[in-house]
């Protein structure tokens, strides 16, 4: 008889500017298809069960409304979040510049900077030779500025195309690896009690 695999439940929030492909990335990952039309998201939750490193993970993915410099994150929705996907579009420089702003707001709101995070550069399928796009080097450099102030937990980085299904699952796997790293370091908040 096979030993039962350990099973974990994790909540992930997908954040970023409007129209960067947060929903298309999420739907591509969860349902394996591309959503062509754009309808502004208010807030959606998706669930997917995946196998990762010999464990079963039930992922609750919170697809948030687009943020700007002035919008507030929904604090109630962020309760229990264990990982963050910060998304921008390579064809929209202002969405790229907004990523550190959203991270800072998140840190201020949660009162911690050690949340596992991945920066996702979406829409690489629209990049061409015109040079008006955010480069991978710029994205990697910016991701290095996001993470815990003690330097132990740096944001990951990956370029994706939800349309062509490039690196979508890889982005979630990188984030899961960062979550496992943090939890194995004795910093998991699973066992801590929070009184509100």
Image (cartoon, rainbow, N blue to C red):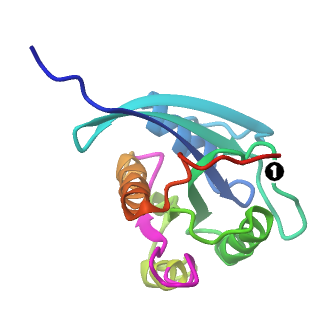
Q: What is the x, y in percent for residue 59?
A: 49, 36
Residue at x 49% of width, y 82% of height: 144
Q: What is the x, y in percent for residue 41?
A: 76, 40
Q: Which residue lies furthest to the top in this view?
A: 1
Q: Name the element at disc 1.
A: loop
Say if residue 172 shows up in the picture: yes
Q: How many marks?
A: 1
Quarter of the N terminus within the rendering: top left
Residue at x 66% of width, y 71% of height: 99
Q: Is residue 70 left or right of residue 151?
A: right
The magenta stretch spans residue 149: yes
Q: In this view, does 177 lie to the left or right of 188?
A: left
Circle 1 crowding by C-alpha within 10 Å: few under 14, some 14–19, many from 20: few
Where, by quadrant of the figure, is residue 180 drawn? Answer: bottom left
Q: What is the x, y in percent for residue 178?
A: 41, 61
Position above or below: 155 against 53: below
The magenta stretch spans residue 62: no
Position above or below: 160 against 46: below
Residue at x 36% of width, y 58% of height: 184
Say if residue 34 shows up in the picture: no
Front-most of 109 and 175?
109
Residue range (magenta): 144-164
Q: Is residue 118 left or right of residue 181?
A: right
Give the residue pinned by disc 1.
75
Residue at x 47% of width, y 38% of height: 28
């Amino acid at each position: 008889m096979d030993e039962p695999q350990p099973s974990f439940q994790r909540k992930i929030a997908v954040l970023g500017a409007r129209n960067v492909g947060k929903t298309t990335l999420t739907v591509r990952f969860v349902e394996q298809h591309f959503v062509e039309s754009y309808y502004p998201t208010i807030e959606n939750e998706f669930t997917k069960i995946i196998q990762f490193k010999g464990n079963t993970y039930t992922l609750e993915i919170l697809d948030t409304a687009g943020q700007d410099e002035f919008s507030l994150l929904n604090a109630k929705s962020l309760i229990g979040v264990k990982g963050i996907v910060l998304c921008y579009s390579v064809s929209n420089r202002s969405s790229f510049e907004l990523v550190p702003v959203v991270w800072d707001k998140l840190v201020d709101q949660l009162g911690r900077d050690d949340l596992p995070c991945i920066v996702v550069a979406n829409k690489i399928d629209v990049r061409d030779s015109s040079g008006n796009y955010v480069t991978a080097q710029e994205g990697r450099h910016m991701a290095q500025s996001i993470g815990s102030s003690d330097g132990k937990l740096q944001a990951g980085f990956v370029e994706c195309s939800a349309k062509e299904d490039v690196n979508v699952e890889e982005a979630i796997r990188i984030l899961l690896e960062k979550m496992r790293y943090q939890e194995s370091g004795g910093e998991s908040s699973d066992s801590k009690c929070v009184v509100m």
